[in-house]
Amino acid sequence: MEKQKIDMKWCADYCREFWPEECAHILRIADDAVERRFLFDLPWDMEQTAEAVEFEGAIDWQYMPKGDPEFIYQFNRHRYWICLGQAYALTGDEKYAACFVGQLTSWLEENPINPGTVKTTWRTIEAGIRGENWVKAMEYFRDCAVVTEEVRERFLHGLRLHGQYLLDCKVPFSDKSNWGVLENHGLFDIGAYLMEHGKDGRGGGCSAGTGLAEAGEAYVEEALARLERELAIQVMDDGVHWEQSPMYHNEVLRCVLEVLRMAKRRGISLPPALTGQARAMALADLAWMKPDRTQPCGGDSDRTDLRDVFTLAAWLLKDEELRFAGYERLDFDSVWDLGEEAALEYRSMKSKAPERLFYPMVQSGNWCLRSGWGRDGDYLHFKCGSLGGGHGHFDKLHVDLCVAGEDVLIDSGRYTYVDTSLRRQLKSSCAHNVPVVDWQEYTQCAGSWEVKGRTAPAARDWCQKGPYTFLQGSHLGYLPAGVLVNRRILSIGSRIHVIADEFYGAGTHVCGQVFHLNPAGSVETGEDGFLYRGARAETAFYRLKPSEGGGAEGMELEETPVSFHYNQLEYAPCVSLWREAPLFVSMITVAAGYEVGDPNPYTVERVPVTAPVTGRRLGDGEAEGLRIRDGRHSWLVILNHLETGADGEYIGADGHYGLGRVMALDETEPGSRLTVLQW
């Protein structure tokens, strides 16, 4: 069925020339495996480790360090077997093949399917992932004398065991979870492999009556039916996976791309929906990709480079925009998977930078604004969507911000899946850049994956006119406390962001804004706000103090935990602004960025808002105005906190008036009028 075998020698020469660091990394992993030492630090290892685990004698496949079962799961996915194969292709050293054979034999002998192992080494998600990893690993050893016919028989037996196990997995959980896609992409890979390598009809040592090729056909047919159903259920109309975690969005996408790749190699026809879903998910990745080409750390996600995903997707889908976001040539893993012909074709593909700079992904509640597609670009990501299940964090109204390509406002990440106080802290709303009430959580963890207090997003609105981008979101989480919180963001270009939080209700409450800053920079606080100093960018955060009353208020700077990779922890500056007062309360912070080396060009001041028909000045609880200057421009921003009606309908300042709840103008433009961003 496969028209052309991949020339492993050519791939090895290619990788030595263009990817020497990756070659060294893979050889280290392979050498470690030979010595029974395991450190999971590949970019897409879902649960990376920072400390190596070494077995002095036989490998204990059930070993669980520090009470974290995620080590068992990652360990038993056998991704390092692919590294053994690549090391063999790079060096010709049969010790890597011997290691593969020894570990394969050990694993098959010591891991029968039983009620205990189905919770550890035989979880269905691991079985699915192994389906891909085993098939890929064996391809590297196809001509190796160490992998004898007897070993191949045992391997085929193991694949058949996996295939039947996955085929028998029929639970509703798989339909709605990333597990289902990971399970069934493995079932597809197993089936496609058996269709080719089981042509002689032998059972590979299995007692089942049908031959391997026939079983493979059944696996492929069922896997495709399940994948089509699961993706239709799980992927939202804007291409985002419903679990609201870029990490698992990409695990699902990578599985679908693997199915497309394997189907192309084996000549298997696919439902058109699979290709469509792969494209939609890849374009969602493109929309939220940060300037440094990594995914946002939203939900349970690591700071992972997306370029290898775009590279494979661009070649499979023949997409010029994805090609733009990918590597200049096939990356290390893609060239082994696709081969010489694909490498040459990829280099000749046209690349086109996307024309869009603003992506409203409304179904998932993700809005992304950027200044351009270079690594030195500005970027804002606003989130107001559904929780997204166990991998979701309590991040409604969260903002990520980059200036000149550098992170300024960050997500705190995940660190661990062990149900500890740190796990709960990193999932909490206060671990994100959000408005909070009384420092309380609107959703509570009931375990590492379970929650109490499901809260719907609300009042989502957006528009873009000229240089202005308006975003709004709310949620119902604080209604039990009698408070409705609403966030409105007005971006002027891509470096000035007015973050206006409104707290509606009754009684006296502590209303707060939380800002988590990049640990690579430093933070200075002052009377009027705080300043982030980074390597390439600085961002001044101006807090507008109330012009009347206002109650007690304060600002606190502390160090809080942040994790950019699983099992890795550091601390970063966090600034909390708060005001204790009777509701209604408005808190406005202006974030204005500029590049290091330039003096801060900005000034921000309050402007009284009036209703010209009656001549009445409106109170802060009705409407607020502010003026932002950068030395060349003077922008006037008007925010109406109430309905436009009576003498609060036609409002403004300094001779500029309009009918709107959010309005802005550049006073330096001759004849300019207020632009209404929200009516």
Image (cartoon, rainbow, N blue to C red):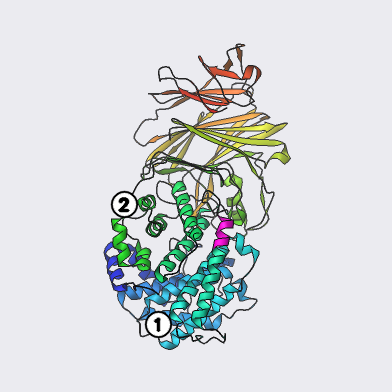
On the picture, is 402 further left or further right than 481?
A: left
Question: What segment carries the magenta color?
Answer: 228-236
Instruction: Decide whether residue 233 is among the magenta residues.
Output: yes
Task: Judge by depth and name the residue closer to the eye, 561 or 207.
Answer: 207
User: Height in image: 84 above or below 518?
Assistant: below
Locate residue 526, reporting x and y percent. 50, 31
* Residue at horizontal 47 percent and vertical 47 percent from the top: 288
Mark yes or no: residue 163 visible: yes
Instruction: Decide whether residue 607 is among the magenta residues.
Output: no
Q: Mark 1 is on which residue type?
A: Ala
Q: Which mark is residue 350?
A: 2
Mark yes or no: residue 58 visible: no
Query: Label 2 to label 1, Cα distance in Å?
Result: 43 Å
Location of residue 24 by image quarter? bottom left
Task: Judge by depth and name the residue closer to the eye, 385 or 433.
Answer: 385
Q: Mark 2 is on which residue type?
A: Lys
* Residue at horizontal 29 percent and vertical 57 percent from the top: 347
Nearer mark to the viewer, of 2 and 1: 2
Instruction: Name the quarter where the C terminus is drawn.
Output: top right
**What residue does disc 1 label?**
98
* Residue at horizontal 67 percent and vertical 36 percent from the top: 484
Locate residue 33, reporting x and y percent. 42, 74
Identify the main secondary structure in magenta. Answer: helix
User: Height in image: 107 above or below 227?
Assistant: below
User: Height in image: 188 above or below 381?
Assistant: below
Locate residue 4, reporting x and y percent. 34, 73
Q: Earlier in the sequence, mark 2 or mark 1?
A: 1
Q: Dot 1: what SS?
A: helix
